[in-house]
Image (cartoon, rainbow, N blue to C red):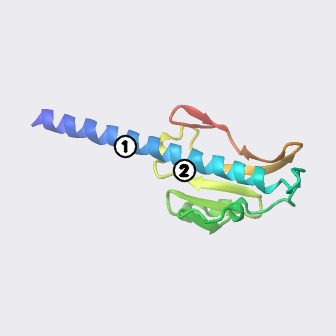
Amino acid sequence: MLVVVVLLWAFERQTRVVRAQAESVAARSTLNALRLSMTVGQRTPTGALRMPALPFNPFTLFQVLPGNFAGERAKSDADDVPPGSWVYDPDCGCVGYRLLFPEWLESGGGAIWFRMDSSADGVQLVPLAEYVWLGQRIQ
């Protein structure tokens, strides 16, 4: 009986690890899509760089909003957002993601946030903290 319990516990833990890894890949994919859309969205047809006025909701650059985009919410209300959802905070010009499995975020908290900053290269997404998720730094 003890062997069965240990095996079930090990299986459950490994399942959570794999699900957290899948979540991390999906979140990084959305971040990359946001960065790409801001880069493409900032170029004129002639290729010149066009700087949008900050802040703006970068999700509006997508042709189709992600199914897990929960809309515009204040960063302080992130706990009210369903886990696994992206939000945009117009007051700070930030995008945030509330994790499904926050126990794998080593830097604490249950969400990751990125501020939109203007630079010579265009608009960048800059992490608001040093986030380490599943042993990897998020940039």
What's the residue at 13%, 34% (across, down)? 2
User: Which residue is identified by label 1?
Assistant: 16
Please state the horizontal and vertical placement of residue 83, each as a whole percent of the image. Answer: 49, 58
To which quarter of the image does residue 98 belong? bottom right
Q: How many marks?
A: 2
User: Which residue is identified by label 2?
Assistant: 110
For mark 1, does the 10 Å Cα neighbourhood hold few (<14), some (14 to 19), or many (20 or more) residues? some
Q: Dividing the image into 4 quarters, which one contains the N terminus?
A: top left
What's the residue at 67%, 62% (across, down)? 62
Please state the horizontal and vertical placement of residue 123, each as a whole percent of the image. Answer: 81, 49
Q: Which element carries disc 1, helix, strand or loop?
A: helix
Circle 1 or circle 2, nearest the eye: 1
Could one spot residue 109 in this view of the protein?
Answer: no
- Say which amino acid is labelled 2: Gly
Q: In this rendering, would 105 be left or right of 60?
A: left
Q: Which element carries disc 2, helix, strand or loop?
A: loop
Q: In this rendering, would 125 be left or right of 8?
A: right
